[in-house]
Image (spheres, helix red, strand yellow):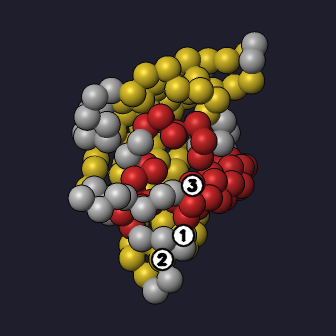
Amino acid sequence: MSRNVRVIKTTPDRVWAVLADGWLYPLWVVGATRMREVDDGWPSVGSRIHHSVGVWPMVLDDDTEVLECEPERRLKLRARGWPPGEADVELRLTAVSGGTEVEMVEDITAGPARLVPKPVRAPLITWRNTESLRRLAFLAERRAAPAEA
């Protein structure tokens, strides 16, 4: 299991706005290269985003499904990227002084990638998710505030 934490210098609702926009997924998730479709209702439980991973021409089409959702607080996903496998990813948002603490926990749950010993795979996932949280921060911190009605 890999655990990353980053304080993003904006409010939880602005971080959530990025997470709740499935079309932004490849902008912050390392490895995702393009979006093909976002289910209506994303990020409600059971909804999916349909993405591709890899570098052209070696691109694999797969999806990520919402397992649990507490808006502006928590999002648990099952990310698929076969043939390597599947991973469960949980993002927890907590308001803190100066912004939002985002905790990202991930581990492989199925597929051949599970055969990689945890002491080997955890540092690789941690390295990848450090960059993913950095990208998420760039998007959330620079996102325009919602227009007042």
Residue type at mark 3: give it.
Leu
What residue is pinned by disc 2? Answer: 99
Q: Which residue is mark 3?
A: 139
Q: Could you say where residue 133 lies in the image, as x and y percent from the top left?
A: 60, 58
Q: CA distance from mark 1 to mark 2?
A: 6 Å
Indicate the quadrant where residue 56 lies.
top right
Q: Residue furthest bottom?
A: 97
Earlier residue among tags 3 and 1: 1
Using the rendered view, name the quadrant where residue 94 is placed. bottom left
The reply to whether discs 1 and 2 touch (Cβ–Cβ < 8 Å) is yes
Foreground residue, 32 or 119? 32
Instruction: Write the residue at 51% across / 40% down.
Output: 24
Percent of width and height locating residue 117: 66, 45
How far apart in space, not on screen, are marks 3 and 1 (Cα)? 10 Å
Decide if residue 115 is on the left or right side of residue 42: right
Compare residues 73 and 1 and report the one nearer the observer.
73
Expressed as whole percent of the image width and height from the top left, the position of residue 18 reads 45, 50
Q: Provide the secondary structure element on which disc 1 rests.
A: strand
In this rendering, position of residue 149 left or right of residue 31: left
Given residues 73 and 124, the one toward you in this image is 73
Which residue is identified by label 1?
8
